[in-house]
Amino acid sequence: MSLWYEFEARSTDEAKFASAIDGIKPLLNHLITGDPLNGTIALDEVRAKKDHIRSSSPELWVLVEKLLEESVAKGLYR
């Protein structure tokens, strides 16, 4: 359980990285399976929710920005 608490709190560099990787999965899933007919999400809200990725891994944030751009182009985010 201590590892889970560490992950949830993002209290170590390893936990921050694991959380960043974990935060990318829903973005990929939504890009692949999302349908704008089911509603759209505000881009600013998504960025705010995923900001922990930017702060823990600027390199991964480049990927997140690309996924967000593709999602906007697909009509999933507004």
Image (cartoon, rainbow, N blue to C red):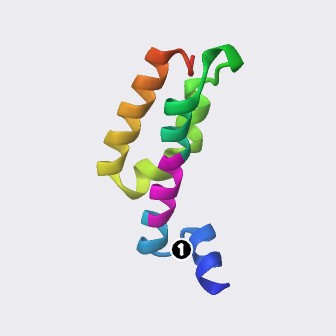
Q: Please identify the quarter of the rendering in which residue 42 is found.
A: top right
The residue labelled by disc 1 is 11
Seen at 56% across and 34% down, the residue is 30
Q: Residue at horizontal 37%, vertical 44%?
A: 61
Please tell me whether the stretch drawn in magenta is mainly helix, strand or loop: helix
Relative to 33, say whether 62 is above or below: below
Q: Amino acid at mark 1?
A: Ser
Q: Position of residue 73 (x, y in %)?
A: 44, 15
- Does dot 1 land on a helix, a strand or a loop? loop
Q: Is residue 11 or residue 38 the one in the foreground?
A: 38
For image coordinates 61% across by 69% down, the residue present is 9
Residue lying at the far front of the rendered structure: 33
Total numbered badges shown on the rendered structure: 1
**Residue 37, image quadrant:** top right
Q: Position of residue 74 (x, y in %)?
A: 48, 17
Q: Is residue 47 magenta?
A: no
Where is residue 77 drawn, in percent x and y?
56, 21
Quadrant including the N terminus = bottom right
Classify mark 1: residues with Cα within 10 Å, few (<14), some (14-19) or many (20+). few
User: Toward which corner of the image does residue 56 lie, by quadrant?
Assistant: bottom left
In the picture shown, does residue 50 fall above or below 8?
A: above
The C terminus lies in quadrant:
top right
Residue furthest right in the image: 38
Residue furthest out toward the left: 59
| Residue in the picture at 40% in, 39% down | 64
Please determine whether, in this image, residue 33 is positioned above or below residue 40. below
Q: Which residues are magenta?
A: 18-25
Instruction: Left or right? Give the position of 57 relative to 16.
Output: left
